[in-house]
Structures are given as structure tokens and as C-alpha cells.
Image: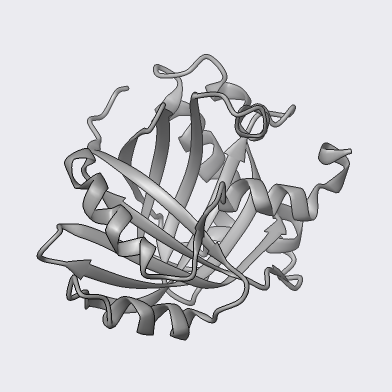
Amino acid sequence: MSQSAAVHHRYERKYLSGDYSAKQLENFLLLNEQSFQKIYYKRQVNSIYFDTPDFEYFQQNIDGEANRQKVRVRWYGLADYSEQVQLEVKIRSGEMIRKEIYPLVNPKKKLSDWLEELTLLVQAKLSEKMEEARALQPVLNNVYQRAYYYSPATKVRITIDERIGARQINDYLKLRPWHFFDFSVLECKYKMQDDEALRKIVRTMPIQIAKSSKYVMGVEKIYPQLCS
């Protein structure tokens, strides 16, 4: 790419919970013997996901391809406007997750007013990295509330996401209502050497590992014709 990115490598495990609220999951976590602590503050996470016209990234996930990727623009907070906007490319190679983060300069506009310009910027930034870059278009707006936890003893970081919603880009531009899901997602981020510590942690919680891409679940919810 023409500009360098911040690059992060990690492993992830995701767990869905429809039987327990986010608050109950938090209580399970804080009572865990590994001494999890709240870090940071709960905040709203907003994303616009990009895909090709034939939803290539969505299909890669549905097909269970070991090597796949996602492209999204992310910002935090309640408003449609944020000065801190970033392009993220999330690349999965087997169990390893590589995330490249590119800060974007917001020309002091609401994101909904900036979407066409933003799309061109995303295409340009990724043009040296992927063949399909010039075909990428925004397809999904995603939102959720995220809380953060960390265990100094195990070096495992866990987030709990609730109030997960999705809508098509046209609905986003016209401020139409969200489609919300009735479950929470617990995500664990850790280094591979900490895998056994993570397994011990989750054994004490009433959750099961699940394939739970928020992008895929959002597409299935609002583009049902792709799943027929």
C-alpha cells in the first residue's frame, strides 16, 4: 500500500449467548478465578463493511475458507460524525488474525455525507493490496455496545458486545431503523501460547464457541436473498 499501517497479530475465539444477558456474562467474568478487571469504558462501536458486488467476502466466510478477509471503516461514539475514523483490513489465515489499521482524515463532515468520497478513498488505499479493491462498495452498517475486560494473570483480553444491530447502507443514509439481534457476543483475544489459559477460563462459563461474524450475521439478516 502507499501508506504504512498499524498491524496487529492475534488469535480470537467467539462465543454467542442468547440465554444470558451481557450483565450476567460480565458477572461470570468478574467472578472468574483469573481476576478479570474492567478496562477502558463501555462505548458504541460503528462500522461500515465493504464487499464486492457479488459479496465475495461474505461467501468466503460462508464457505469456511481458511484464508479470508474483511474490509470495514470503523469509528466510535454515538454520533454520525467522528474525527477519528479508521480503515481496517482483517485477514484470517487459519487460526491467526492479522489486522491492518489505516487512520483516515475526516474532512469535518458527517460520515453519511462523506460516504461516496470515503468509498473512493478505501478503493484507492487498497488498490495495491487486492485485485478487487476498485470494485469494493459499502454494503452494511453495523453497531453494538462493547465492554472491555483483561486478566493480568493470563494476558487474555475479553470483550462483551450487546445491542448488536445491522442495516443496509441505504437505510443508514436515510436513518431508517436498525435490525437488532437478541444475543450477546463474547470475544477473546489472546496469543497462541495462552490458549490453554483461555480454555480454562471459558470452562467456568455457560457459553459455547460459535462462528459469529457480525458482518455475516448482518448480511444474512438484511440480504436474505443471498442465503436462499
In the rendered image, is residue 214 in sight?
A: yes
Point out residue 80 in the picture as x, y percentages from the top left corner.
52, 69
- Left or right relative to 27: residue 110: right
Closer-to-camera residue (226/177): 226
- Left or right relative to 208: residue 108: left
| Quadrant position of the C terminus in the picture | top right
The residue at 84%/47% (across/down) is: 224
Indicate whether 86 appears above or below 61. below
Point out residue 187 in the picture as x, y percentages from the top left corner.
40, 58
The residue at 75%/66% (across/down) is: 174
Indicate whether 81 appears above or below 48. below
Please tell me in which quadrant of the rendered image residue 41 appears: bottom left
Q: How is the image coloured?
A: one colour
Point out residue 26 in the picture as x, y percentages from the top left corner.
38, 80
The residue at 51%/36% (across/down) is: 70
- Left or right relative to 56: residue 147: left
Closer-to-camera residue (13/134): 13
Point out residue 49 in the picture as x, y percentages from the top left corner.
57, 46
The outermost residue toward the left is: 153
| Quadrant position of the N terminus in the picture | top left
Closer-to-camera residue (34/44): 34
User: How many marks are shown on the rendered structure?
Assistant: 0
In the rendered image, is residue 83 in sight?
A: no
The residue at 24%/36% (across/down) is: 7
